[in-house]
Amino acid sequence: SYELTQPLSVSVALGQTARITCGGNNIGSKNVHWYQQKPGQAPVLVTYRDTNRPSGIPERFSGSNSGNTATLTISGAQAGDEADYYCQVWDSTVVFGGGTKLTVL
Amino acid sequence: EVQLVESGGGLVQPGGSLRLPCAASGFTVSSNYMNWVRQAPGKGLEWVSVIYAGGSTYFADSVKDRFTISRDNSKNTVYLQMNSLRVEDTAVYYCARSVDTPMVTRYFDLWGRGTLVTVSS
């Protein structure tokens, strides 16, 4: 079965750029979607099909995908961006990464 | 307002059953792909089941033959019927609408707040 690998945690200084990676075999050939989940809340879609942003999601959230790594980039991270982030692909079924806890220092 | 509201969670003994409704508003469930995704306490997300607009249903291997998914178009509500529950089914269960390109991709653009199911003796 297909596996997605995310770092358990990422830290970023307030206002700096955070990059959260999602590794998978030839993931560049798949569409990658990212979700943000704050404590006690439901996940929220922040990017889809690698680089697209749903309406209402700030421009500081962007995605990229190539080779064996997809990346969610948060430019100018804010305190409110502290959350768990999950990547997700389709590989004959829905596959989620294990999640990354983002801490804004 | 476009939203999903789950209910029906609670404490159930191993081997028991539970039915989770997911009431939709602002859109029609019968025209969409509707899913259940669960999250065990302190763990990540796990897809559970989908019902397609055409009525086809699919399940994760972990729940196959124990769970069923259905919908009531008159109530604009999707249901997850869970039988033969196990301790490892303990989780928050989210209802989620998906956008599908068949055989290519699926992503979840609308989520409910979830309902907690605890399986314990």
Image: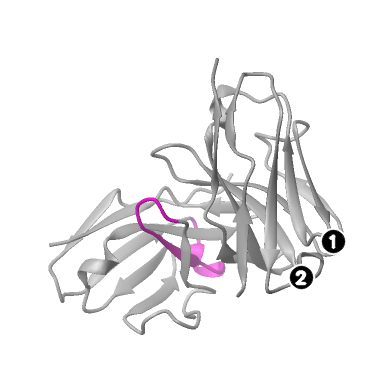
Residue A3 falls left or right of residue A11: right
Specify few, some or many for label 2: CA neighbours under 10 Å numbering under 14, 14-19, or 20 or more. Answer: some
Residue A36 colored magenta? yes
Have a look at marks 1 and 2 and say if they share a chain: yes
| Snapshot quadrant of residue A104 | bottom left
Q: Confirm whether residue B44 shows in the render.
A: yes
Image position of B22 (left or right of A63): right
Q: What residue type is labelled 1?
A: Asn
Chain that bears disc 1: B
Give A50 or A26, whichever is nearer the viewer: A50
Cα gap from disc 1 to disc 2, whole angstroms: 8 Å
Residue tagged 1: B73
Residue at x-position 75% and y-position 54%: B78
Residue B58 at what x, y percent from top left? 76, 48
* Residue A92 visible in the shown view: no
> Mark 1–mark 2 contact, CB under 8 Å?
yes
Instruction: Tell me if residue A32 is in the magenta stretch.
Output: yes
Above or below: residue B29 compared with residue A25: below
Q: Name the residue under label 2.
A: B28
- Tell me if residue B26 comes above or below residue B81 in the rendering: below
Mark 2, secondary structure of its residue:
loop
